[in-house]
Amino acid sequence: MRKSTVCAYLAASVVGACAMRPWMTNETPPPAPSAAEADALELVPESAMEVLAAEADALELVPESAMEVLATGEAQAARVPDEGTGAKAPPAATATGEAAQTAAEQREALKKTLLLLPFRNATKYKGPWDIHIQLPRGLADSLRGAPYIRTIPVDSGFVRLNEEELAGKILLTRALALGRELRADVVVVGEVLELTMKRSRAVVRIGGYRSYEAGLEVELHFYNVIDGTSMGEYLGTGGSNSKRTGVTNPAAYLPLDKEYALLGLAPALWGSQEFAESLVGQAVALCLHDLKIGVTESAVPPPELIAHEPKIIDITDAQAYINVGLANGVRNGDKYGVWNHGRQLSDPDTGIVLGFSLPARVGVVQIERVLNDRLSFVRVLEGQQEIEVGFSIRAE
């Protein structure tokens, strides 16, 4: 079993609520509290009760947390909107949600973007499973949430391919062109080297053993979209067996015999529960897990910049230059955040300048060509209108 490591610079990230329902006409409402209980309990203010009554008539479901707020007389200040009513969330909640969404988008922009293309079938398997398509689709699913990596939806690439290319027979120049069209950083092509199910049997005097084994091997190849250079390869493997020893009931082998006999004819539907429980399905899951580990462990952030003051030194539209290069270990495809110097802050009454706010990230750049030890040409991915000469750059 061999494995080779992908180049180290392959780099790149919900609310439920209990609902109350109004009493139905055939239900008996709970007894009213006594005067002492009413004093001990903080009863809902009359205005809030009117709101609740109106909502009960309309059969609107009010979250429990909102009911607690109503019980303190603050119904209008913090009322939770019902989905589908078109009601707007409170301004504070909206601002918090927008800030969280912006932060998430910024993290996504710095991730390495992978385009997975169909895998070529180099095995003897000629069955009905469309392994060219299903394996890269499964790998894309397994990479969701991986740090420093995001994948372009595989169908975005598949719909642009002809029948031969969908079978994994795609030229590198074509793969790179698709990567540029879909704004990927890395294109991934692969070969299915093995997809088998084997069985063996030996008989001894008082019993024996029978073994069924399924195996899958997939080799991935990674290419940098910017310059077309190879970024390495990785071999993922997965195997599952059902070896049984001693005296066993022959009926126990029937499901495995059926799976073996039907592998190339009428196997379980790919991705079904039956498939997942089969030996081949288990081998596929193990192989995809192995590939995920290989890709994510090699997907590290770009190197920290050690220049005295890494910054933008020139910019024209979506093209710019930065004062870092080979001496910093940067490579084509690395992404960096661009940060401003902060806003000038003045006293609103006197107009006296008090200082500057904290720097904020205003954009993202990607290295397209390392020119020398202290100079690189970059493409502006985000913030073209905000980035200025002198703004600093950081690895994130």
Image (cartoon, rainbow, N blue to C red):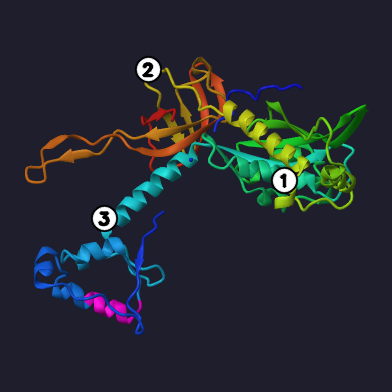
Reading the image, the residue beneath label 1 is 277
Q: Residues within 10 Å of mark 3 (few under 14, many from 20)?
A: few
Asked if residue 221 lies left or right of residue 94, the reply is right
Q: Position of residue 66 (x, y in %)?
A: 27, 63
Q: Where is residue 250 in the image (x, y as percent from the top left)?
A: 87, 42
Residue type, numbered disc 3: Ala
- What's the mark number on residue 92? 3
| Residue at the extreme bottom of the image, as rendered | 25
Find the magenta span and give its range. Answer: 51-59
Residue type, numbered disc 2: His
Cα separation between marks 2 and 1: 57 Å
Q: How crowded is mark 1: few (under 14 residues within 10 Å), some or many (20 or more)?
A: few
Task: Using the rendered view, name the quadrant where residue 197 is placed.
Answer: top right
From the viewer's perspective, is residue 360 above or below residue 373?
Answer: below
From the viewer's perspective, is residue 49 above or below residue 326?
Answer: below
Q: What element carries label 1?
A: helix
Asked if residue 123 lies left or right of residue 347, the reply is right
Reading the image, the residue beneath label 2 is 308
* Mark 2 or mark 1: whose residue is earlier in sequence: 1
